[in-house]
Image (tube, rainbow, N blue to C red):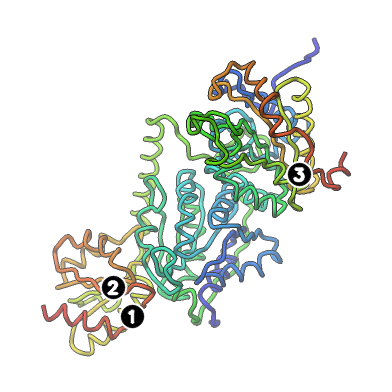
Amino acid sequence: MQTVFQYPNALTDVTTHYCPGCTHGVIHRLIAETIDELGIREKTIGIAPVGCSVFIYNYFDVDFAEAAHGRAPAMATGIKRVRPDRVVFTYQGDGDLAAIGTGEIMHAAARGENITVFFVNNAIYGMTGGQMAPTTLPGMKTTSSPNGRDVELQGYPLRMTEIMATMPGVSYAVRRSVHDPGNINKTKKAIKTALQVQLNQAGFAMVEILSSCPTNWGVTPTEALQFVKNQMIPYFPLGDFKIADVVKALR
Amino acid sequence: MKELWEGNQAIAEAALRAGMEAYFGYPITPQTELLEYLSKKMPTMKRAFVQAESEIGAINMVYGAACAGARAMSSSSSPGVSLMQEGLSYIAGSEVPVVIVDMMRGGPGLGNIAPSQADYFQLTKGGGHGDYHPIVLAPASVQEAVDLTYGAFDLAEKYRHIVIIAADGNIGQMMEPVELPPPHEVAKRERGWELTGASGRPHRFISSIHLQPEALHAFNVHLQDKQREIEKNEVRFAEYSMDDAEYVVVAFGSAARASQSAARWARAKGIRAGVFRPISLYPFPYARLTEIAQRVRAILVVEMNAGQMIEDVRLAVAERVPVKFFGRMGGLVPFPDEVLPEIEAMVER
């Protein structure tokens, strides 16, 4: 009998702790499938963030280090510099990458570190229970912006991929979403390209992935995917913000 | 053959000779020469050097490189070491070996760039959150700074722990004749815990998270067992004219050197003075100092701070004899002729 669908080798057979309707599981699977397809499971080292995906190292059958909140790009720098033949990626949420860790991500990008960053943006702090994130939309209610984010008081959301795209050290900066099958497929292609950038020593690559948080948004899983489509994408448009010539040459 | 070396550069060279594969740092006075020296040497040696965006970036790069099994080091001075404490707590909790050099300067806050010993509490009592103590070694000369740095990587790997070279700006900036140790090759070794990619083995992870209280308790018990092992094996100190000493100065680093001259002058005046110099500030030489306290008349603690190590001295002495204090702050190094009257005052009492 021919096997047409199976668990990726790069994932462990462990039940995840994620809430129903959260798309971390989809994103994990896409990364794992890509690691399998590229045949790099045995030379990949991941850096886990602080936040909802803090236990990612339990779910991936690859070596992992756990970073302090926001510091994953610095740890990835240390690992990659001493093991340049390994594939090093960080997996970071919006609180991790766009708030406490802005310094680390900006400078890893500015240095053009040959690492891959998966940036999962759900516009809210998930693990701590739904507080305002740097990516919380204007007017969006959270436990720490109970009347809705007021940009006069709380400032504007950060569009990290657009910021990354301005930096010469960045070779690949794109935003994708996993709210429907078509976009899931596009996200997987971007994940693959981002890892191929690293395999070809072509510099810093980041894929921002819009993700859902039904628990903290206070909506059903289906409504959460609608929220990504109707509310988040208008503020965080999907697309390729930087594809350096060196990356185009890989295609 | 002895050569004249500046302290910071000599430490950098000693670290290279110890097989340091990766250095990540950020410039801060009075230790910048260390970073500058390595920025010249390491790229030509094909070893990893990054001038980080901050001390926070630097310590997390060290953490990453150490997770990947490299001999990794950073160096800084007091305000920068304060910034590194977050990373040091995670490193202690993850049990990876790292070496840090702290060329202490005056504080608190921005303070100044002159020599100080006011990081004693921060370094020896943990610094970052949680129950741990780094191994803290305090050199009193450039030669000793070289020797301690050279051995620090082996020590860090022995316990999978943090080793801090606690010097002061004086040691970093002055030049002294030094005998450098022989270079030893960067050993490409598998120690069974480092992250290399899960080739032909189950995947590994390095982490400091233990969500269940019972599990975190058990891990802390393990860490404390390791601390007791360190306390048993790694106590270091030096003694000067201590055999018949009645009046003892306890001091470390630069303060100990000034105290030695003062003790010598006191001897010339007929006072039986000696100097006890802790080299390991953690583990502190409590047992030896307790023995000493049983046979002397009084103890003077001299520090370049407001009195930090004196708390450990008092624990060892346990009120057997009077313990006095003389301190200089703000980057002032005590002069022997300032310490001598303090020794004489012990006798007069």
Q: The disc numbered 3 marks a residue on which chain?
A: A
Q: The disc numbered 2 marks a residue on which chain?
A: B
Q: Amino acid at mark 3?
A: Gln
**SS at badge 3:** helix
Residue A75 % position (x, y)? 60, 48
Residue A68 % position (x, y)? 52, 43
Whether discs 2 and 3 lie on one chain: the answer is no
Q: Which residue is mark 2?
A: B327
Residue A182 % position (x, y)? 78, 22
Please name which of the two marks, 2 or 1, marks the residue nearer to the observer: 2
Residue that extends furthest to the top in the rendered view of this protein: A1
**SS at badge 1:** helix
Q: Can residue B192 be seen by looking at this rendering?
A: no
Residue occupying the point 45% across, 60% down? B164
Q: Which residue is mark 3?
A: A198
Q: Is residue A213 above or below residue B273?
A: above
Sequence order check: which comes first, mark 2 or mark 1?
1
Is A1 positioned to the left or the right of B256 in the image? right
Residue occupying the point 58% across, 67% down? B35
Q: Which residue is mark 1?
A: B258
- Estimate how packed mark 1 is, as few (under 14), some (14 to 19) or many (20 or more) residues with alpha carbons within 10 Å: many
Q: Which of the 4 image quadrants contains residue B259?
A: bottom left
Q: Is residue B176 above or below residue B208?
A: below
Q: Can residue A131 be seen by looking at this rendering?
A: yes
CA gap, disc 2 and disc 3: 55 Å
Please name which of the two marks, 3 or 1, marks the residue nearer to the observer: 3
